[in-house]
């Protein structure tokens, strides 16, 4: 079943590439428009990196935004259709590469080292330890890892507050989404345990709030490597 979920996750990003691109570029997703896009950009700029790797970059919006602030940005994603549309809109010191998480270690030499690694709503699989272990090899000296994910206390809904697979139907994101997307939900305890097991130390945690409900929308977590 795990293999089926991972295959469905990958296939959904191939099938939904055009619909996702439109949803992002037309700002159809309220949580992104009101909260999370600005939260990740502000957190990155506060760290003042010179070279950033955007893991699971999608259609490239974050890399394009960072380039406008004079930051060299590299985006990787396992979805070739998403990388294709990112490359079409590329400008300045941004570059994109088709690369899944399982390929990071093999492509580390070509990718180089980064002051900051960013995973913005991109850690959706169940077995994340191999990915988090591989990321140490992409860090420059004193480099750090910044993760934004759905806030666990908002995302578990009526299923119960426990780890497990969930399904994103993309309802309200506009037309064209051909396949639902399975994703793996983690409690806060599980996130922190995963970091400890893979050699990452939490430096700070932020909880961006919705401006109207004042409820937490996401978790932002900055981590440093205990191996570098």
Image (cartoon, helix red, strand yellow):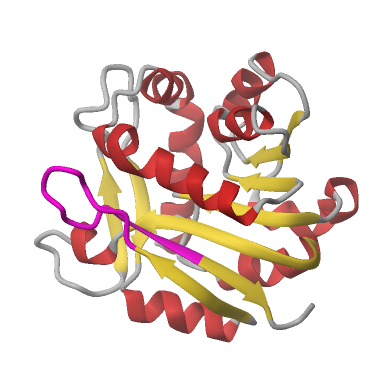
Asked whether 162 or 155 is in front, the reply is: 155
Q: Quadrant of the C terminus?
A: bottom right
Whether residue 52 sits left or right of residue 1 in the image: it is right
Q: Is residue 7 visible?
A: no
Who's the residue at 34% across and 37% down the image?
32
Asked whether 42 or 111 is in front, the reply is: 42
- Which quadrant holds residue 223? bottom right
Who's the residue at 62% across and 63% down the image?
145
Who's the residue at 36% across and 23% down the image?
23
Q: Is residue 181 above or below residue 138?
A: above
Figure disc tally: 0
Whether residue 172 sits left or right of residue 94 in the image: it is left
Q: Is residue 97 above or below residue 159?
A: above
Whether residue 40 sits left or right of residue 165 in the image: it is right
Q: Position of residue 4 (x, y in %)?
A: 43, 53
**Is residue 126 rendered magenta in the image?**
no
Main SS type for the magenta part?
loop
The residue lying furthest to the top in this view is 88
Q: Position of residue 174 (x, y in %)?
A: 26, 20
Who's the residue at 27% across and 49% down the image?
167
Q: Position of residue 45 (x, y in %)?
A: 59, 47
The residue lying furthest to the right in this view is 109
The segment highlighted magenta reads 207-221
Asked whether 188 or 106 is in front, the reply is: 188
**Is residue 211 rendered magenta in the image?**
yes
Q: Quadrant of the N terminus?
A: bottom left
Q: Position of residue 99 (x, y in %)?
A: 70, 43
Q: Is residue 183 visible?
A: yes
């Amino acid at each position: 079943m795990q293999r089926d979920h991972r295959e469905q996750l990958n296939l959904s990003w191939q099938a939904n590439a055009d619909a996702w691109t439109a949803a992002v570029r037309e700002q159809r997703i309220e949580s992104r428009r009101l909260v999370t896009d600005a939260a990740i950009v502000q957190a990155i700029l506060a760290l003042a990196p010179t070279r950033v790797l955007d893991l699971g970059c999608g259609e490239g919006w974050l890399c394009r935004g960072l380039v406008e602030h004079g930051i060299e940005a590299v985006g990787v994603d396992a979805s070739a259709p998403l990388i294709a549309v990112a490359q079409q809109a590329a400008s300045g010191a941004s570059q994109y590469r088709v690369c899944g998480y399982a390929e990071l270690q093999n492509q580390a030499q070509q990718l180089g080292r980064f002051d900051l690694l960013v995973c913005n709503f991109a850690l959706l699989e169940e077995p994340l330890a191999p990915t988090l272990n591989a990321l140490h090899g992409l860090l420059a000296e004193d480099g750090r890892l910044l993760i934004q994910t759905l806030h666990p206390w908002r995302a578990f809904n009526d299923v119960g507050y426990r780890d497990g697979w969930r399904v994103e139907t993309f309802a309200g994101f506009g037309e064209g989404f051909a396949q639902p997307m399975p994703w793996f939900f983690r409690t806060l305890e599980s996130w922190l345990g995963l970091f400890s097991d893979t050699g990452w130390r939490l430096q700070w945690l932020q909880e961006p709030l919705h401006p109207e409900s004042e409820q937490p929308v996401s978790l932002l977590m900055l981590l440093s490597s205990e191996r570098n």
